[in-house]
Amino acid sequence: MKEYYFAVIKFPVLVSTVLIILVGLFFLLALGSNSRTGISGNETIIYTLVFISLVFLVSNWILVLMSTHSVIKPPFVQRFSHWMLSHIYYPMAKALNFITLQKTHTLQESFLNFNNEIVMSNYMRLENPKMLVLLPHCLQGSECKIRITNDINDCADCGACDICTVKNALSNQPVKVAVASGGSLARKLIADNRPDLIIAVACHRDLTEGVRDAWQFPVYSILNERPKGPCFETTVSLKAIEFAINRFK
């Protein structure tokens, strides 16, 4: 539990730090301008607009933090907050993470875990949700002669990779399971199925890009394991997938 807490907390700490720095710089510049020559009419307009923008950023960030423990209503506010999370707050955290020379994958993992908390808090009350489980093609064995790029039922059930394991385990679950060979196919699968909830399995980078790209949909992320290196015969925890399905169904 303690390890998971620290895996979640990095992203919100970075965002909060950036916002504190921005607010501090604003007041330093405003007070400095006022003490030197006073603030002109044009400067007053600029500082007012910047102040309103900062108030908006901070207020919305507080709303995002609240969404990890409670449902945000109405739905359009929820969607807008998720857009802000993906396209404003994540770049903020990424910039500070780069400046402080920290590892990118730890930020990505924290962002994904933080997003999972939001998804679990806001979408567990759906009735009979239409769920889509997206798997990466790299789960497939490299020597398999069948190229599975969409329908998991194309799997020959040889048992050599986790594609077979997941297929058989989820055959009686109320979910659609699909294999995506890349971002374009993943977007097409989402557009064709229009799920209420997505459970996505991939690596740090692909999951982060996918969550941000599909911000209109609630995406619960599960990191794959890479015992043989990236994008080659990866594995996934079946318990993690079943846990996610059982939490939302």
Image (tube, helix red, strand yellow):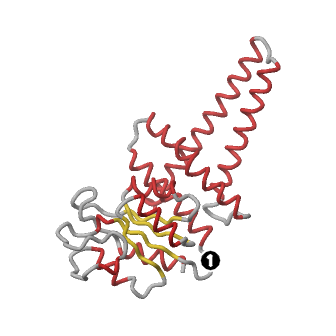
The residue located at (56%, 47%) in the rendering is 87
Which residue is the extreme one toward the right? 41
Q: Is residue 236 above or below residue 50?
A: below
Q: Is 168 placed above or below 236 here? A: below
Which secondary structure lies at badge 1? loop
Tell me the kind of residue under disc 1. Answer: Leu
Q: Where is residue 201, by image quadrant?
A: bottom left
Relative horizontal placement of residue 232, taking residue 243 as reference (left or right)? left
Q: Nearer the viewer, residue 189 or 138?
A: 189
Up-down relation of residue 46 to residue 139 (above or below): above
Give the class, few, some or many, for how many residues have Cα within 10 Å of label 1's Cα (few <14, many ≥20): few
Between 47 and 151, which is closer to the camera in this rendering?
151
Report how many numbered discs are placed on residues in the image. 1
Examine the rendered structure and indicate whether residue 36 appears above or below residue 207: above
Relative to residue 137, is residue 240 drawn left or right?
right
Given the current orientation, which residue lies at the most extreme left position?
143
Question: Where on the picture, by quarter, is residue 46?
Answer: top right
For residue 189, side relative to residue 151 (left or right): right
- Residue at 60%, 71% (x, y): give it: 123
Q: Is residue 245 left or right of residue 120?
A: left
Q: What residue is disc 1 on?
A: 126
Q: Residue at x 36, y 83 (%)?
A: 169
Give how far across and how far down residue 82 sits, in percent. Answer: 61, 56
What's the residue at 76%, 21% (across, down)? 43
Residue furthest to the bottom = 172
The C terminus lies in which quarter of the figure? bottom right
Where residue 28 appears, as percent x and y from the top left, is: 68, 24
Q: Position of residue 121 (x, y in %)?
A: 60, 67
